[in-house]
Image (spheres, rainbow, N blue to C red):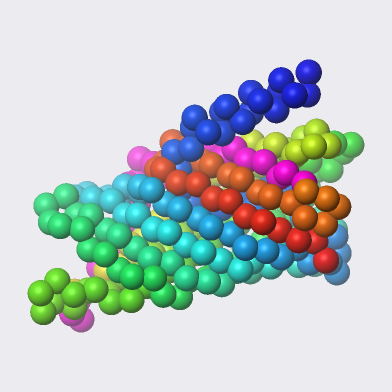
């Protein structure tokens, strides 16, 4: 029965990965005074912006570290690099090559009974790629990604699937020369559904796979180590 449930959740995950917002990290919160660290890749395939600003894409790679402030509260930090590709409706795509990206967040576990747990999270990612030139015109961009999430998970021993809801906003901040404009997400697509898995390799190492639906298209995966 457990394998049937697992396969059903995998099917949901891989057929509904239409998302993007900062990854939720899942519900694996480190114990007080302990750390969880690893590498994460986050790929935004498409995120729609307001009005006629079109859409953005981004690929981000991070080293991440979570610290257990308490058994129920985690501080999450990450640093790495990311790019931005922005495609206005009436112009060609602007391609910003990878440079610094970083993020931070908090997760609070407010329910932990037997094999079931629930976690509230806040995450923020900021991507600062290299400048891009169209002819002699200098373009600069920053991608700001804000998210609140509520996740529930169930421990099946061989994996920990989780489902939940989230609210998120992705802002594309764009400079043409010295003129600055903040272009926000499509306001009709700010909420979504989260589906993911924590898959243990051993007592210390586990994979995290995650997708989010209804507000864009994206996915993330990570390899983590407990210490």
Q: Is residue 217 magenta?
A: no
Instruction: Give the residue at x 80% y 37%.
Output: 158
In this view of the protein, which residue sits in the foreground, 159 or 123?
159
Q: What main secondary structure does the magenta stretch of the protein show? A: strand
The residue range painted magenta reads: 177-200
Instruction: Give the residue at x 62% y 55%.
Output: 222
Please tell me whether residue 45 is drawn above or below residue 86 in the rendered image: above
In this view of the protein, which residue sits in the foreground, 97 or 212?
97
Instruction: Give the residue at x 78% y 24%.
Output: 2
Q: In the visual, does 76 lie left or right of 183?
A: right
Q: Residue furthest front?
A: 201
In this view of the protein, which residue sits in the foreground, 2 or 178?
2
Q: In the visual, does 211 lie left or right of 85?
A: right
Tag count in the figure? 0
Instruction: Give the residue at x 54% y 42%.
Output: 211
Q: Could you tell me residue 57's position as x and y percent?
A: 35, 54
Q: Could you tell me residue 147's position as x and y percent?
A: 53, 54
Q: Is residue 186 visible?
A: yes
Q: Residue furthest right?
A: 114
In this view of the protein, which residue sits in the foreground, 10 or 143?
10
Which of the 4 image quadrants contains residue 69?
bottom right
Q: In the visual, does 78 lie left or right of 98?
A: right
């Amino acid at each position: 029965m457990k394998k049937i449930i697992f396969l059903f959740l995998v099917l949901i995950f891989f057929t509904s990965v239409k998302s993007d917002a900062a990854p939720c990290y899942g519900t694996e919160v480190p114990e007080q005074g302990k750390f969880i660290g690893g590498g994460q890749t986050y790929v935004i395939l498409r995120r729609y912006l307001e009005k006629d600003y079109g859409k953005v894409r981004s690929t981000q790679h991070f080293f991440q570290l979570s610290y257990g402030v308490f058994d129920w509260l985690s501080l999450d930090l990450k640093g790495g690099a990311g790019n931005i590709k922005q495609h206005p409706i009436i112009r060609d795509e602007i391609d910003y090559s990878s440079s610094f990206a970083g993020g931070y967040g908090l997760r609070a576990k407010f329910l932990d009974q037997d094999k079931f747990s629930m976690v509230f999270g806040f995450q923020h990612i900021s991507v600062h790629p290299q400048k891009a030139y169209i002819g002699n015109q200098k373009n600069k961009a920053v991608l700001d990604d804000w998210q609140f999430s509520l996740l529930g998970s169930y421990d099946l021993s061989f994996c920990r699937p989780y489902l939940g809801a989230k609210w998120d906003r992705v802002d594309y901040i764009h400079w043409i020369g010295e003129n600055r404009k903040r272009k926000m997400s499509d306001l009709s697509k700010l909420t979504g559904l989260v589906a993911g898995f924590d898959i243990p390799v051993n007592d210390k190492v586990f994979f995290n796979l995650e997708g989010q639906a209804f507000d864009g298209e994206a996915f993330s995966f990570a390899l983590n180590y407990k210490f």
